[in-house]
């Protein structure tokens, strides 16, 4: 007997469409991030949440292991020729995807995608992102412990806002019927 594949062709195509759309959106995010880069760790902490929006949207809509990483990497590939960062945007997409994938697995186990859990996923991803990427900025900008806590809170808050935006955007798109064949669409159909 044949087992159902982990990913269907429809799910892969849906992930690719999501990735291309967010790849275009990531282009403007990279320019905004470049603009605030010189403003210090607080501005960077607040701006990094923009890169989590594709991850939150993909996690909530597709609810599959690997979906977040796939969407983030492909959106990075789409953005490469149009950003001031070139190939670095692929690394940013891969890192954000890996962090989002880890946070999604830890918080939801790909089963419960209620708003509180999605927000917790964003908070955990923001904490991990700050610890792995932004904290390296602290070497060149020494801060007091209270300011480090504030910068961390800004990063966590930015990722939670991105998770909320992904949730709201996914629900708005789902109401159009475009996402009817996704995990989110099936859940909405069962709830009616």
Image (cartoon, rainbow, N blue to C red):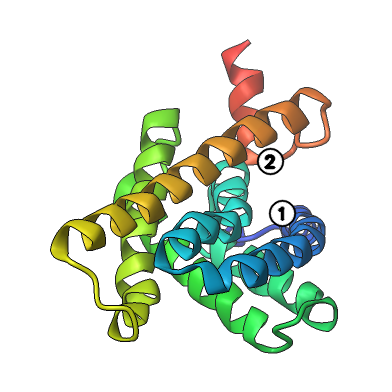
Closer to the camera, 66 or 47?
47
Give percent across and percent down for residue 164.
Answer: 52, 36
Q: Cα distance, mark 1 to mark 2?
A: 7 Å
Q: Residues within 10 Å of mark 1 (few under 14, many from 20)?
A: some
Q: Which residue is mark 2?
A: 182
Mark 1 vs 2: CB contact within 8 A: yes
On screen, 79 above or below 85?
Answer: above
Residue 81 seen from this side: yes
Give percent across and percent down for residue 165.
Answer: 60, 38
- The quarter holding residue 102 reads bottom left
On screen, 65 above or below 169?
Answer: below
Which residue is located at x 70 percent, y 84 percent? 85
Closer to the camera, 21 or 129?
129
Which residue is located at x 54 percent, y 45 percent? 162
On screen, 85 above or below 23?
Answer: below
Q: Exactly how many numbered labels are in the figure?
A: 2
**The C terminus: image quadrant:** top right
- Residue extending farthest bottom: 87
Question: Would residue 127 appear left or right of 52 to someone viewing this image?
Answer: left
Task: Give the structural element (helix, strand or loop) at label 1.
Answer: helix
Residue 6 seen from this side: no
Which residue is located at x 51 percent, y 68 percent? 96
**The N terminus: image quadrant:** bottom right
Which residue is located at x 24 percent, y 59 percent? 147
Closer to the camera, 189 or 33?
33
- The quarter holding residue 112 reads top left
Closer to the camera, 113 or 87?
87
Q: Which residue is mark 1?
A: 11
- Residue extending farthest left: 145
Which one is earlier in the sequence, the residue at label 1 or at label 2? 1
Give percent across and percent down for residue 54.
Answer: 63, 55
Task: Give the structural element (helix, strand or loop) at label 2.
Answer: loop
């Amino acid at each position: 007997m044949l087992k159902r594949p982990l990913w269907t062709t429809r799910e892969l195509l849906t992930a690719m469409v999501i990735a291309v759309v967010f790849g275009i959106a990531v282009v403007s995010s990279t320019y905004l991030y470049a603009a605030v880069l010189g403003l210090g760790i607080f501005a960077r902490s607040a701006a990094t949440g923009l890169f989590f929006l594709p991850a939150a949207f993909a996690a909530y809509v597709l609810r599959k292991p690997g979906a977040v990483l796939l969407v983030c990497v492909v959106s990075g590939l789409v953005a490469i020729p149009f950003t001031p960062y070139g190939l670095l945007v692929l690394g940013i997409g891969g890192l954000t995807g890996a962090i989002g994938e880890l946070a999604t697995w830890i918080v939801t186990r790909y089963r419960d995608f209620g708003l509180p859990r999605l927000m917790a996923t964003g908070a955990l991803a923001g904490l991990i992102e700050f610890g792995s990427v932004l904290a390296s900025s602290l070497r060149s900008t020494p801060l007091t412990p209270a300011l480090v806590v504030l910068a961390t809170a800004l990063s966590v808050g930015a990722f939670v806002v991105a998770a909320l935006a992904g949730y709201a955007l996914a629900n708005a798109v789902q109401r159009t019927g475009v996402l009817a064949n996704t995990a989110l669409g099936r859940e909405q159909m069962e709830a009616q």
